[in-house]
Image (cartoon, rainbow, N blue to C red):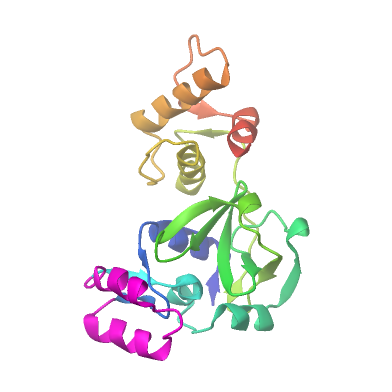
């Protein structure tokens, strides 16, 4: 069975993929787009169909497809809700990567540090968003995912796990930085950290930006 850490990494690897309703992580051909438009005419309005046709030849997914792409088990957002092993109010979401976040008609994946990866819509594609901004109502522990404990380090440096560095890079990107989320703590990431500290009003004298602690993470989450 696939696991929550793998789901988190999968979601990060799909950032920037196009959104097309009914697609499940596949190349969008004209034939498929026309088929989806015929199946879901209320969604594929004239305007959306024109946008969809511009995505021909590219990978695409919808919100539930982002998860199904990883598990190989096809479910819609309601299907994931109905089959969840555990579910609860979003206000009580556990700090566990890979739990799904859900509201009626939509689903995303919690990746830690107050962030969600979701296939947000045809105008956005697969993006990182803040948990607090999503109007989510429930968290779900998915039937198709085995869950293991994974605690992101609250001290991140050049020797940290790549997943932890990716958390840092993604969180910095929510503040307007344009970092490649590759899990490598390079010069661009370090410079972004220094810039953030400076904008936040912290002293950076003698600092290199190659290590952050709990205070920086908490400041980035605000």
**Image height check: is 57 above or below 181?**
below
**Image height check: is 48 above or below 93?**
below
Q: Which quadrant, please, contains the C terminus?
A: top right
The percent position of residue 39, horizontal first and vertical second, equals: 40, 90
Q: Is residue 53 magenta?
A: yes
In front of the other: 177 or 43: 43
* Count of numbered marks: 0
Is 213 displayed left or right of 65 in the figure? right
The percent position of residue 98, horizontal first and vertical second, equals: 59, 63
Q: Is residue 19 magenta?
A: no
In front of the other: 201 or 86: 201
What secondary structure prevails in the magenta region?
helix
Which residue corresponds to the image point at 45% horizontal and 81% vertical from the top-left?
72
The percent position of residue 19, horizontal first and vertical second, equals: 39, 68
- Farthest-out residue, front: 46
**Image height check: is 75 above or below 69?**
below
Is 7 displayed left or right of 16 in the figure? right
Is 3 displayed left or right of 69 in the figure? right
In front of the other: 98 or 60: 60
Q: Which quadrant, please, contains the N terminus?
A: bottom right
Which residue corresponds to the image point at 44% horizontal and 73% vertical from the top-left?
62
Which residue corresponds to the image point at 57% horizontal and 16% vertical from the top-left?
201
The percent position of residue 63, horizontal first and vertical second, equals: 49, 70
| Residue 220, picture quadrant | top right
Per the rendered image, the range of residues in magenta is 28-57
Which residue corresponds to the image point at 21% horizontal and 72% vertical from the top-left?
57
């Amino acid at each position: 069975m696939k696991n929550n850490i793998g789901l988190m990494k999968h979601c990060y690897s799909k950032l920037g993929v196009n959104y097309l309703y009914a697609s499940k992580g596949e190349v969008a051909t004209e034939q498929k787009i026309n088929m989806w438009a015929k199946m879901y005419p209320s969604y594929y309005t004239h305007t959306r169909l024109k946008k969809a046709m511009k995505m021909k030849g590219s990978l695409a997914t919808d919100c539930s497809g982002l998860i199904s792409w990883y598990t190989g088990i096809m479910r819609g957002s309601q299907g994931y809700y109905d089959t969840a092993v555990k579910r609860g109010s979003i206000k009580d979401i556990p700090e566990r990567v890979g739990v799904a976040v859900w509201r009626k008609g939509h689903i995303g994946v919690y990746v830690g540090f107050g962030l969600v990866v979701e296939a947000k819509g045809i105008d956005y594609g697969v993006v990182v968003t803040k948990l607090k901004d999503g109007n989510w109502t429930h968290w779900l522990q998915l039937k198709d995912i085995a869950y293991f404990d994974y605690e992101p380090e609250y001290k991140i440096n050049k020797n940290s796990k790549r997943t932890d560095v990716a958390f840092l890079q993604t969180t910095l990107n929510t503040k307007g930085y344009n970092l490649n989320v590759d899990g490598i703590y390079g010069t661009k990431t370090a410079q972004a950290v220094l810039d953030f500290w400076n904008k936040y009003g912290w002293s950076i004298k003698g600092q290199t930006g190659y290590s952050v602690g709990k205070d920086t993470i908490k400041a980035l989450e605000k």
